[in-house]
Image: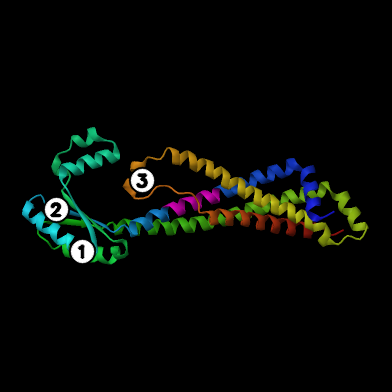
Amino acid sequence: MTPVERAWRGGRNDWRLHVLSVFSVAVAFVCLASALLVVVNVDAVRERWAQTGRASVYLKAAATPEQVSVLEKALRASEGVTDVRQVSADQARRELGGLVNEETLLSALPVEAFPASLEVMLRDDLAVARLEKLAAQLAQLPAVESVETYQAWSERLAALLAGGVTAAGILALVVFAAVISVVSSTIRLSLQRRRVEVEVLKLVGATDSYVRRPFVLEGAAQGASGAFLAIALLGVLYAIVHSRFDQRLALLIGSGPSFLPWHVALAIVVLGALLGALAAHTSIRKLLVL
């Protein structure tokens, strides 16, 4: 009988024990996968904002139409600029009302609360360099109140992302310890239930390696199954959130939610299998002293 067949028979006989182990491993990996999902989406927003190629040039209330027209023509003639859109104060109020769905509240504010602006779009490959240069030049013009390049938000997101990666790393260590503990305990209980079978194998000359292999396969299967179940559960939760996600919010932040890349999901499943095999191998090696 091959190790796979012996592992299948052992897992079938102790299926309740293995199901409990898989569920416990899945709970641990759901926590890790959720943290990674947050990191992936924050990084996507940061990357989108870092390469947005956009600047908002806010105009002074005293700016004349002639000054605005000259400024718009100069921007259109600038290298790397793909489009310039003039937004009046009234347009800004209507657009913001459409995004946040608070038209009644915004309508109570005066038009002066929404400064007119020129929305400047640049090619993505020139975004960072051109935005910094344009912002410095535009800020010196008499008709310009301020220039928003959104780079500060990108830097804040980068700091948030660094903190998220650190937190995910710490959580990963906790998850690794939990998976190893759960699988080790399950394999030890399984070994105790099959002690007679193991003793018979040892009496007929079976090596420790031969006895150990099916248990290692069972541990790997538990780890991989738990990780796969965690990805599946997270996928269901993601689908629910995504179906209710407001597309206006995606337009506002520049990026919609995305699921874990396939290679990250595959890496989690492989990691679960490796941790399960390691836990089973370690626990069985300590107990096979007959």
User: In the rendering, at what x and y percent does residue 146 appear?
Assistant: 18, 56
User: In the rendering, at what x and y percent does residue 5 appear?
Assistant: 80, 51
Magenta-span inclusion, residue 95: no
User: In the rendering, at what x and y percent does residue 164 appear?
Assistant: 45, 55
Q: Earlier in the sequence, mark 3 or mark 2?
A: 2
Q: Mark 2 to mark 1: distance in Å?
A: 15 Å
Label 1 sits on residue: 134
Judged from this view, the residue extending furthest toward the top is 104
Q: Residues within 10 Å of mark 3 (few under 14, many from 20)?
A: some
Judged from this view, the residue extending furthest toward the right is 204
Q: Is residue 43 left or right of residue 231?
A: left
Q: Which residues lie in the magenta part?
A: 31-41
Residue at the spot x=10%, y=49% of the render?
Answer: 61
In the image, what residue type sits under mark 2?
A: Leu
Magenta-span inclusion, residue 40: yes
Q: Main secondary structure of the magenta part?
A: helix
Q: Residues within 10 Å of mark 1 (few under 14, many from 20)?
A: some
Q: Which mark is residue 59?
A: 2
Residue at the spot x=22%, y=56% of the render?
Answer: 83
Quarter assignment of residue 280: bottom right
In the image, what residue type sits under mark 1?
A: Leu
Q: Earlier in the sequence, mark 2 or mark 1?
A: 2
Q: How many marks?
A: 3
- Quadrant occupied by the C terminus: bottom right
In the image, what residue type sits under mark 3?
A: Ala
User: In the rendering, at what x and y percent does residue 48 appear?
Assistant: 36, 56
Q: Earlier in the sequence, mark 1 or mark 3?
A: 1
User: Tag 2, which secondary structure?
Assistant: strand
Label 3 sits on residue: 250
